[in-house]
Image (cartoon, rainbow, N blue to C red):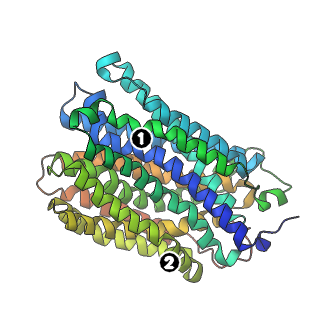
């Protein structure tokens, strides 16, 4: 019988590195679509719309991926709770990678008419379905191997994956944007990052082929027959509170990385290259600080950091929008950086916090559903709402007000959740309903 407290640091490092690489690849797939939606998908797939309506339509297909993520968490959560965490990692990576590569081959509206945006919509849905399973599998496999006193640290490695995926996706876009003409980029250049996803997916599958199953799953003798039913019946309040709490993280992240990118290019006249560079630099700093913030979570608790992140976001949204509106690279970078630091103050500890809130038999489903419902509330709506609120304003204060409101909602949700640290093992009783 394995025990989660006997896993040695070298083994944990290999496991954490493999989980990090996998989440980086899957989030690369997800983010490259968001960048393309902000830059080129509107004119190519919705040419009959006005520029604003085309951007909104492109962001709508972007949002479909978030709607699919909770469904993916249900599907893959069932597999993870019934058959193990490891199969989830392989299946989700295959699905997301295949859908991403296929996006690179979709003909534009000019070639096949309305079938083009429909295909785009279907593939984006499949992307979201795969990513909905990825987070739960990667985080739980790491968290359930980790020693209790350092669970926050080891669980934060998969949380670095989104930063790496974003930098990789936007780095490719940045190089293409800087080296190709606008006509070349619109014709074929935007497709290259999607095709590259096939190579990355193959590498990720190779890395994950040697991962061992979670010892906590192997210890369990009583598996939930239908995990979703148990979660809906016994943990519905916990799911809603975690989703509401996480909403601000998603809202802030996608306001910076998707809406601000489109706003800066289309409304402020800043070049694609400059906008991408400012955002990428802020994301790099955020990603590098993730383990350090997670260590604070191991020492001081998960809930205090989540509350602090919400407060920071609420206080910074108006300054961030003001700095963005200047169009000055250094000031925009400062605005983005502080916003993402508030984001990571929460999300560095979430990978340890959510699993600790749920009992092991439904942990894969419960944690993943709460996490991805937060994505629907914060990530799917934010680019759409922010784009609509920014229309016609010199400085889009409406966007700042919206983001501040989401931050206050999340603050209230986290205030109602219990603390889970320190714990000797992962078997933490769920919050009473």
Residue at 18 percent across and 31 percent down: it is: 50
Q: Is residue 138 left or right of residue 285?
A: right
The correct choice, above or below, for 172 with respect to 412 in the image is: above
Q: Quadrant of the C terminus?
A: bottom right
Q: Quadrant of the N terminus?
A: bottom right
Find residue 328 and report its image quarter. Answer: bottom left
**Local secondary structure at mark 2:** helix
Residue ranking furthest to the bottom: 299
Q: Residue 189's x, y, as percent?
A: 33, 36
Q: Quadrant of residue 216?
A: bottom right
- What separation in Å lies between label 2 and label 1 (alpha carbons)? 39 Å
Task: Name above or below for residue 93 compared with residue 286.
Answer: above
Q: Is residue 110 above or below residue 394?
A: above
Name the residue at 84% across, 54% down.
Answer: 222
Residue 431 seen anywhere in this rendered image of the structure: no
Q: Is residue 418 left or right of residue 381?
A: right
Q: Nearer the viewer, residue 229 or 334?
A: 334
Q: Earlier in the sequence, mark 2 or mark 1?
A: 1
Check disc 2: other Cα within 10 Å, few if <14, some if 14-19, many if 20+. Answer: some
Query: Does residue 363 show up?
Result: yes
Q: Residues within 10 Å of mark 1 (few under 14, many from 20)?
A: many
* Residue marked by disc 1: 193
The image position of residue 418, as x and y in percent, is 58, 72
Q: Residue at 46%, 45% (x, y): give it.
A: 30
Q: Which residue lies under the disc numbered 2? A: 304
Q: How many numbered markers are drawn?
A: 2
The label on residue 302 is none
Mark 2 and mark 1 residues within 8 Å of each other at the beta carbon: no
Query: Residue 27: image x %, image y %?
Result: 49, 49
């Amino acid at each position: 019988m394995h025990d989660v407290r006997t896993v040695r640091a070298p083994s944990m490092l290999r496991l954490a590195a493999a989980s990090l690489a996998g989440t980086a690849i899957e989030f690369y797939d997800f983010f490259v679509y968001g960048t393309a939606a902000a830059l080129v998908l509107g004119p190519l797939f919705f040419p009959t719309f006005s520029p604003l309506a085309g951007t909104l339509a492109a962001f709508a297909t972007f949002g479909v991926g978030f709607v699919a993520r909770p469904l993916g968490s249900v599907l893959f959560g069932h597999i993870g709770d019934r058959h193990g965490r490891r199969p989830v990692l392989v299946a989700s990576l295959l699905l997301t990678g295949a859908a991403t590569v296929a996006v690179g081959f979709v003909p534009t509206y000019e070639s096949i008419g309305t079938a083009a945006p429909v295909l785009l919509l279907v593939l984006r849905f499949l992307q979201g379905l795969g990513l909905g399973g990825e987070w739960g599998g990667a985080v739980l496999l790491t968290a359930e191997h980790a020693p209790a006193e350092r669970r926050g640290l080891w669980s934060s490695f998969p949380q670095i994956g989104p930063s790496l995926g974003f930098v990789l996706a936007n780095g490719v876009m940045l190089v293409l944007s800087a080296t190709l003409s606008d006509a070349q980029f619109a014709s074929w250049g935007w497709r290259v990052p999607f095709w590259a996803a096939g190579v990355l997916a193959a590498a990720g599958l190779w890395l994950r082929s040697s991962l061992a199953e979670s010892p906590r799953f192997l210890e369990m003798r009583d598996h939930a027959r239908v995990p979703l039913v148990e979660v809906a019946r016994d943990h519905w309040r916990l799911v809603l509170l975690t989703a509401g709490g996480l909403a601000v993280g998603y809202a802030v992240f996608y306001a910076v990385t998707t809406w601000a990118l489109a706003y800066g290019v289309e409304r402020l006249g800043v070049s694609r290259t400059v906008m991408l560079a400012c955002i990428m630099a802020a994301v790099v700093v955020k990603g590098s600080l993730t383990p350090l913030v997670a260590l604070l979570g191991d020492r001081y608790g998960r809930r205090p950091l989540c509350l602090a992140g919400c407060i920071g976001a609420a206080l910074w949204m108006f300054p961030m929008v003001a700095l963005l509106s200047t169009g000055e690279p250094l000031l925009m970078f400062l605005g983005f950086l502080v916003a993402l630091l508030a984001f990571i103050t929460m999300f560095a500890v979430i990978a340890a916090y959510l699993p600790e809130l749920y009992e092991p038999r439904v942990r894969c489903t419960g944690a993943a559903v709460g996490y991805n419902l937060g994505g629907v509330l914060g990530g799917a709506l934010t680019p759409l709402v922010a784009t609509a609120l920014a229309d016609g304003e010199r400085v889009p204060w409406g966007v700042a007000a919206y983001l501040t409101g989401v931050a206050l909602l999340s603050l209230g949700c986290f205030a109602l959740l219990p603390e889970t640290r320190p714990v000797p093992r992962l078997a933490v009783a769920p919050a009473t309903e």
